[in-house]
Amino acid sequence: MRDFRDAKVMAQTLREALNARSVSLTVGESLELIAKILGFPDWNVLAARIKATGQDDSKRVAEPARNAASGAAETEAEVPPTTLDRYAGTYRFHNAVFTVRRDGRRLSAHLSGQGSVSYRALSETEFAGEDVDVKLRFVSESGNTPATLVLQQHGNDHTMQRIDADAAQELERAIKERMKGRSANPGTEAALRRLIEEVAAGRPDYSAMSPGLAEATRQQLPRLQRGLAEMGPITSLAFLGVGAQGQDVYSVWHEGGASHWHIALDADGRIGSAFVMPGP
């Protein structure tokens, strides 16, 4: 059962719920709102009350969390704040930035253009998303700051390398400039055409994909092939713009239908990410 000592966790839950409805709150604003909801004049008064009890929310025994996929209870592990601080930072996700921050006894993280997700600790190196089926695993050597972060979603692993603040800012700047200028990355149109034609034929070139995309394509090939084959040959492609994570967005018309594709190329020219949505 939650009480006033869980105010920080409650504020995090409030931010996530409002963020899902496109309402943005700072940490301070959410704490002030929770303080008023609990009947305190402001956060400073509530914080003093929590301190006076000698047991703030960061020291309370964690309630069992629920696994987003199975609904089963999971025990939240206690991870030292110094370890959480080492995990905080920026990681490269294809052409976008995955930002990790410490938020009390948990981590919060977001991808470029997306809202933050709270992550609870399953162990000292593994974390599970709150109400989303996503897990994070930090890989480090000899207790040092991790150089690699593995994000697991839908059974696929996405490995991200840690980058410094300057590199992260440059990636974010490049995305904003391309979104503003509506400029496609060279090679994405040709790569997308090849990908669609190969998948429709049931013979995708996995060597032209990142490991994560190749594995996802293998798993989904029967469904993807059937859907693309039913729509028939491509008649035209049109570049629509740049997505929030830096993917190029295309409308693809076939003889028997249409679809929207998001595609991004890695630095080595392979397709790093690609996904399709129903078209008009």
Image: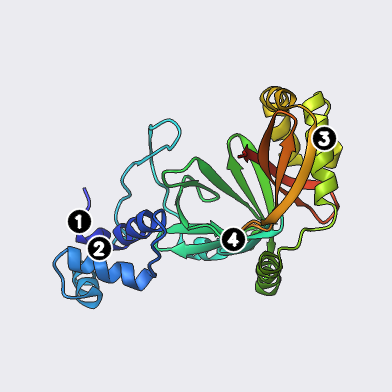
Residue 209 visible in the displayed image: no
User: Which is in the foreground here, disc 1 or disc 4?
Assistant: 4
The answer to whether residue 128 is left or right of residue 217 is: left
Q: State the SS at label 2.
A: loop
Farthest-out residue, bottom: 44
Q: Which residue was labeled with disc 2? A: 55
Q: State the SS at label 1.
A: loop
Residue lying at 79% horizontally and 53% vertically, measured from the top left: 266
Quadrant containing the C terminus is top right
Q: Quadrant of residue 54?
A: bottom left
Residue 1 visible in the displayed image: yes
Q: CA distance from mark 1 to mark 4?
A: 34 Å
Residue lying at 83% horizontally and 45% vertically, measured from the top left: 191
Judging depth in this view, the residue of 156 and 182 nearest the camera is 182
Farthest-out residue, left: 39
Q: State the SS at label 4.
A: loop
Q: Which residue was labeled with disc 1? A: 3
Q: CA distance from mark 3 to mark 1?
A: 52 Å
Q: CA distance from mark 4 to mark 2?
A: 36 Å
